[in-house]
Image (spheres, rainbow, N blue to C red):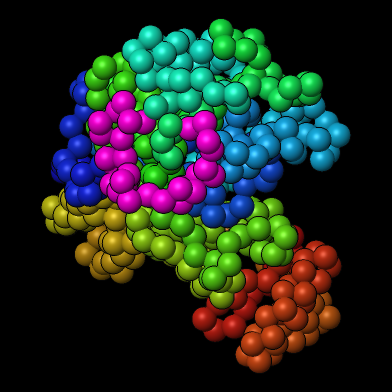
Amino acid sequence: MKLKLFNTLTRKKEEFIPINKDEVSMYSCGPTVYNYMHIGNLRTFFFEDILLRVLKYDGFNVKYVMNITDIGHLVSDSDEGEDKMEQSAKESGKKVSEIAGYYTDVFKRDVDLLNVIPPLYYPKPTEYIDEQIAMIKCLEEKGFTYVTSDGVYYDTSKFPDYGKMARLDIKGLQEGARIEYSEEKKNITDFALWKFSPKNEKRLSEWNSPWGIGFPGWHIECSAMSKALLGNHIDIHCGGIDHIPVHHTNEIAQSEACNGEKFVNYWLHGEFLDMGNEKMSKSLGNFITMQTLIDKGYSPMDYRYFLLMAHYRKKLKFTFEALDAAASGYKNLSQRILKLKTEIDSGNTFDKSLIETYRERFSAKINDDLNMPEAMSVIWELLKEEKITSADKLELIYEFDKVTGLRLNEIKEEIPSEIPEEIQKLAVKRIDAKKKKDFKLADEIRSLIKEKGYEIADTKDGFTLKKI
């Protein structure tokens, strides 16, 4: 089955043909480790994990790189404001390296809980300063840069195809539409390659360069690190849709101008998690992390199952009611798996071609631009299939789980325990609160039940309780 992927660059599905048949090169933009990752961030890393799993399922050997940004990402993507890492360090009274180390560990824990396969390399820009300076020098020698009072900038007017992926109307951009206007910038779309440290102020992180003491711009890190680890021309580059108009557009301009060849063959971007009309933020009180979900009694696999219900290029609306439905779905799937384990079939599936039919159907869905909702439908149909033995079903589902990543081979029967009357009453009270749409009270009761050592999960028939 041929893999087809939606290429953001061309805005159409294309058959995936690797540069090198023996190895696929893949780069993803990772986290800026100044704070916790929220569940919207995790959706992007989940989509990239599905892509990696599909490539592996199809037999490709993948050399996968994901950067961890520990310097240079300013509060505004438009080269304005304070460095996010420096800001977090100053607020906490810690070193930048301590902040980066702590949030990197938390990030890795979160994606591990979500069963995201780690990349071969997690490069950090602070470890590739020389490579970034070398690329800026390359651009300087080719006439793509100029110097202002606050840094070295890329002259986007020198790159004819600038904005081709984002399909930017460069002439139509008004001053300040994308970036804060600067008298020293030649073009509104120009961006910083190297930022100078403020005069009379020593930054927590800064380096010497041919142009002066400072730090690299955010965009140059990915161009330099992908070049160092994967080469000039790579197969796949991923990220969230927010990276299209600025970060990835600038990466193309840098890499292709310096290297003199095409940078990436296939660009893939994941849609946002829809939290309603408000952006997820701590100040708004809707900053939901993986730990938030765990504290509320959900398992990481409940959230992974939830993410599997939507295509990566479609917005997915998050509500706790929707997550409850996903948790119920994952529980039902788990119970079906346990049932298959206990069933004893006589003989084997008579018509083995039926097994191959399901394998082909599953493969067709995942190879159609990672269509996981329909791939999950194939799994549910397989579970209901009466002409395939339980043993063969189980073997096939475990094979499919190499893509879905739901850890279905780890599911074990839970030992029932007696639930105290007090906990049962709280559970009933919570159901009543949900029926009255008092979700705040329902969440408070869920937390109280958890504090007392029990976990509640909603089902279509009501709820289940278990001791933690």
Identify the residue shown where x is 52% and y is 81%.
Answer: 460
- x, y percentage for residue 19? 21, 23
Indicate left or right for 84 with 12 as reference: right
> Image quadrant of residue 21?
top left
Residue 300 appears in view: yes
Farthest residue to the front: give it.
Answer: 183
The number of numbered badges drawn on the structure is 0
Q: Main secondary structure of the magenta part?
A: loop
Magenta stretch holds residue 69: no
Using the image as rendered, state which of residue 173 and residue 328 is in the foreground. Answer: 173
Relative vertical location of residue 390 with respect to residue 409 in this rendering, above or below: below
Indicate left or right for 164 with 29 as reference: left
Indicate left or right for 203 with 2 as reference: right
Magenta stretch holds residue 175: yes
> Image quadrant of residue 194?
top right
Relative vertical location of residue 347 with respect to residue 445 in this rendering, above or below: above
Using the image as rendered, state which of residue 462 and residue 274 is in the foreground. Answer: 274
Identify the residue shown where x is 69% and y is 31%.
Answer: 100
For the N terminus, which image quadrant? top left
- x, y percentage for residue 457? 62, 71
Q: Which residues are magenta?
A: 156-185
Residue 4 appears in view: no
- x, y percentage for residue 130? 54, 10
> Image quadrant of residue 138?
top left
For the C terminus, which image quadrant? bottom right
- x, y percentage for residue 168? 31, 47
Using the image as rendered, state which of residue 209 and residue 150 is in the foreground. Answer: 150
Identify the residue shown where x is 72% and y is 60%.
Answer: 283
Identify the residue shown where x is 37% and y is 37%.
Answer: 249
